[in-house]
Image (cartoon, coloured by chain):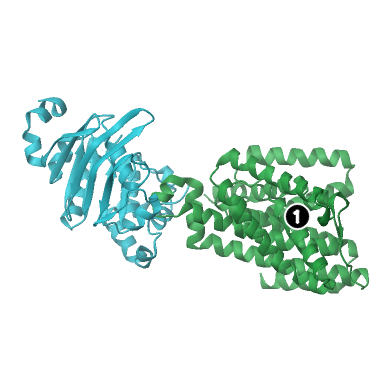
Chain colours: A green, B cyan
Amino acid sequence: MAIALIGLVAFPLFGPPVYFISFVFWVFLYVCLSSSWNLIGGYAGYLSFGHVAFFGIGAYATAMIGKIFGLSITMTLLATIPAGVISSFIAIIVGYPCLRLRGPYFAVITLCFSFVSQLTVKNLEFLGGADGLWLKSMDVPVLVNRTIFYELMLFLTVLTVWVSYLVGRSRFGAGLRAIKEDEEVAQTMAINAPRLKIMAFALSAFFPGIAGGIYACYLSYIHPDVVFDVNMSILQVLMALFGGASSWVGPVVGAVSLTLVNEGLSTFVKAELARIIYGLLFIIVIVFMPNGILEFFSRKRRKIER
Amino acid sequence: MLEIKEISVSYQRHCALADVSMTVEQGDFVALIGSNGAGKSTLINSVSGLTKISKGSILFQGETISGLSPDLIASLGLIQVPEGRKLFPLMSVEENLEIGAYLPDPRKMYARNLGKMFEMFPRLKERRKQSAGSLSGGEQQMLAIARALMAQPILLMLDEPSLGLAPIVTQEIFKILRELNDEGLTILLVSQEVLQSLKISRRGYLLENGSVNLTGASGDLLKDVRVKESYLGL
């Protein structure tokens, strides 16, 4: 584990092409997003289909903090932390009414929430409206620039996965799992379901908020269509479910494998065909491995061992 | 310990409970009997906070608990074993017991209580890693009781623990309840098994059409003509 981590930290020092650094940056971003989604979606079973909203909110919050205070790009990067807090705060306000809904109703209302936040940003003049916002860019060579963002995203991703691991093992996580299986019974076992759900939702909005901020600095230009892209919401859900949403490993495996497959397909196969294969893969996994690939393979191994 | 004062509950226009009063003393073993639809589950759910009462009040250890949320009531030590067991089917036996010991105090005693439960229900120990959904009906009921006991209840409420079980398993479970009460646990038992529950309990309440029609020592209820005719078929 430690060796793999050191390898990942040192990776850019071996001088790989910029393309690879950017690609791994994307892998980290998705691991971070699907792992944090998993806190509410996987552990508590509340499938949020609008989680990109928190990514977008983080991106805009970071950009605005930088703009209002006229911060340098390095200071703007520090502003991602308050941006994460703002994301969590909005999650608490939104979650309070929304988390009373269950199943498909919760999925739909969170989806609507992400559309509403996108439209709100598009129509607010001081947030740049439909023109988007420019951020200061770093005055360094591309490779150095990419490496800095690579390391930042790596740090955030490791932090997210670590928190997800800790939550999974804690009393908090046990409470969330009980809520997932049967909320009424959980409450009769002294579990304060409304509070636990809000806490999980706020935590699951915190990391995407920071990730959004880092992403904003990385691109140095943000647009509502990019940082509130509904596809991103759907992807993080699919990645978590693909890997297996009941543990912290699932979203990591799901995000890594799907990003690799997607990139591989788009590089080696025609774009149209790549989409079709990608879609088929999802159908296969959902139909034959409803609990994710991890559980599917571990079950198979157990069968062989017998 | 538990005082139910003239509570009424209605579902839309249908009245499920009308001015029902009941008390459970420390160390008591109360059986709440009656036929289907008499309001037994409604009564126990009102105490747990799962059903809102429209009139009256419920006091536990001198404090009003009606209107509190279910998790708050449970944290006071009023633990329910729900009807139909309601385990967490995908979790293992041990994980279910862990959820039972969710509150800080029971959690500190987790290891000790777990040992006690496995002593009381050896079959759960054999199946500790198995998922709760894969257990037999009797084992599931035992797990439901053990999960509730892990919370270190002051008052244990059971809703139809014999539902769907073979007579011999029912006897086993009732015997365990009797032993728990002998050790000092206060129990409120809801059951359609009139004969058996009156045999093991100390006092009984007969609920009919949403109101208490008869109450007294369980032995006396067993001799009552009305109970004999309507419920025991004698």
Give coordinates of residue A3: x percent, y percent: 70, 73
| Rendered view: B105 above or below B212 | below
Q: Amino acid at mark 1?
A: Gly
Give coordinates of residue B18: x percent, y percent: 25, 34
* Left or right of residue A246, residue A273 in this image: right
State the SS at label 1. helix
* Left or right of residue B68, residue A235 in this image: right
Task: Give B205 or B55, whichever is nearer the viewer.
Answer: B55
Give coordinates of residue B52: x percent, y percent: 36, 41
Task: Give B29 or A68, whichever is nearer the viewer.
Answer: A68
* Left or right of residue A250, residue B211 in this image: left
Where residue A49 sits, quadrant-wise, is top right
Which residue shows up at 36% across the image and 57% down it? B75
Q: Is residue B25 visible?
A: yes
Task: Give B107 or A213, whichever is nearer the viewer.
Answer: A213
Task: Give A223 or A39, whichever is nearer the viewer.
Answer: A223
Give coordinates of residue A271: x percent, y percent: 88, 42
Q: Tell me which chain the residue with mark 1 is part of.
A: A
